[in-house]
Image: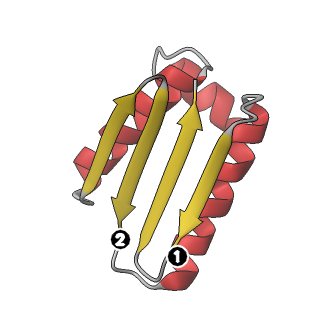
Amino acid sequence: GGFKEQMQMANRKYNLSDYLAGLAHWLDVSGFPYEHEKVNGVHTVRMRFDMGKRWCIFVGRVHQIMFRNFGVENSTVEITNNTVTLTIQT
């Protein structure tokens, strides 16, 4: 639904690489610290929120849903009290 239209309005394709670019842009604008590495086709994105575990669970669930929508099968979402780590095989 709505997220696909938002990406299209931002002149982005509805695919994983543009989604990851949009995520990095959102994190930059929001000021949340993060790292994004790509090694041998595996993207690892570590985000620190310092907003408590509930926020991290929410962000993690959103990404699990997004990965399912993109048809990404080889992904993991790890949650701690203040961080979310996404690992995506491309």
Q: Residue at x 41, y 70 (%)?
A: 83
User: Would residue 39 appear left or right of 87 to someone viewing this image?
Assistant: left
23 to 60, vertically: above or below: above
49 to 47, vertically: above or below: below
Is disc 1 in contact with disc 2, using a CB cutoff of under 8 Å? yes
Badge 1 density bin: few <14, some 14–19, many ≥20, Cα 10 Å: some
Q: How many marks on residues? A: 2
Q: Quadrant of the C terminus?
A: top right
Q: Residue at x 32, y 41 (%)?
A: 36
User: Would residue 23 appear left or right of 15 to someone viewing this image?
Assistant: left
Q: Residue at x 44, y 23 (%)?
A: 40
Report x, y in % for residue 32. Answer: 27, 60
Report x, y in % for residue 58. Answer: 61, 69
Secondary structure category for the residue under label 1: helix
Q: Amino acid at mark 1?
A: Trp
Secondary structure category for the residue under label 2: loop
Q: Amino acid at mark 2?
A: Phe
Query: In the image, which disc is placed on residue 49?
Result: 2
- Toward which corner of the image does residue 67 lie, by quadrant? top right
